[in-house]
Amino acid sequence: MKLLIQLCSVVVLILCSQHINAETVITVSQSNSAKQPVSLQYKQSPRLVQVIKDSLENSAPLATQHKSLAIYWLAAGLYDYSTEAEFQQKQQQIIHLLKTQYDDMETPQNIKALKTLSAWFTANQFMKRELILLDYDSIRLKDELNPLLTGRYLLTLPSKPENVLVLGAVEQNGSQPFIVRQGATEYLNNAIPLDDSESSYAWLIQPDGKLEHYPIAYWNQHHIDIAPGAIIYLDFQGVRDNEQQLNQQILELLRHW
C-alpha cells in the first residue's frame, strides 16, 4: 500500500448486490495522498467488476480536486484490511532484521544503505494485496477473473507515476525518474551497488506485483521492460548468514506495497 494513504472526510455510498448476505466495504482512493476517498458499502457481497464499475462512477466527482488523469490499471491495487495487523508484524520483523545487520558493522556505506532502507520501511504501510487483474475491460469479459468480495478492502486507482523505486544493497535507496527502455543495470548503477551485493541478478517487481528475476551481469544481460512505478531490488550478499532470509522477506513484503 503506497505511502500514507489518508482515510478521512469519507464520502459514503451504500449499494445493493444480489449475492451472499454479508457486508462489504470498499474504500476507493485515487492517489497516494487522497484526502477524500470514497467508501462503497454493499449490503451483500458484490462481484469485482461491480466494485470497479461503482468506483469509476462514484469517484469521478473527486477527480476535480486533483489533476484528472487516466487510471494506470497496471498499478491498481486491492488490499485486504483484515491483514493489517499481520503485515505490520511482517514489517517490524524486517525492520528488526535490518537493524541486526548494522549493529556491529564497520562498513559506512553498508550501514547507510541499511539505515535508509529501514527508514523507508518504517515510513510505509502494508496490507495484503490481492494479486488479481483489476482492469475493468478485462474482468467483465471472464467469470474466472470476477470473484465475489466479502470484507473490508482498499482499492487504489492511481494515475501513471513518473518514477522507478530502487531498493536494497545500494548506497542510494529511493526513487529515480522513469526512462523508457532503460534497464535495471542503469538504474542500479545510478543507485551505486554495494560491494556486498548480488552481482548477477536483481529482482523486478512490476506495478501489478509480478516478480521477475532480472539478469544484470555482463555475461547474462537480457532486457526486460520496466514499467513506470516498478521496484528494482538488489539482494544483500556476502556479509551475514541471515541475508537470504532478509532478502526473501523484503521481496514478499514489497509485493504488497
Image (cartoon, helix red, strand yellow):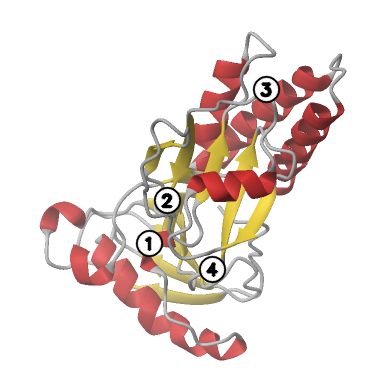
Label 1 SS = helix
Earlier sequence position, callout 3 versus callout 2: 3
Where is residue 201? Give x, y as percent. Answer: 47, 31
Cα–Cα gap, marks 2 and 1: 8 Å
The type of residue carrying mark 1 is Leu
Q: Nearer the viewer, residue 235 or 153?
A: 235
The type of residue carrying mark 4 is Pro
Residue under numbered circle 1? 74
Residue under numbered circle 4? 161
Q: Is residue 125 visible?
A: no
Label 4 SS = loop
Residue under numbered circle 3? 196
Earlier sequence position, callout 4 versus callout 3: 4
Cα–Cα gap, marks 4 and 2: 13 Å
Q: Nearer the viewer, mark 3 or mark 2?
A: 3
Label ID, residue 206? 2
> Is 50 placed above or below 154 here?
below
Earlier sequence position, callout 1 versus callout 4: 1
Q: Nearer the viewer, mark 4 or mark 3?
A: 3
Where is residue 135? Give x, y as percent. Answer: 29, 66
Q: Nearer the viewer, mark 1 or mark 3?
A: 3
Cα–Cα gap, marks 3 and 2: 25 Å
Earlier sequence position, callout 2 versus callout 1: 1
Label 2 SS = loop
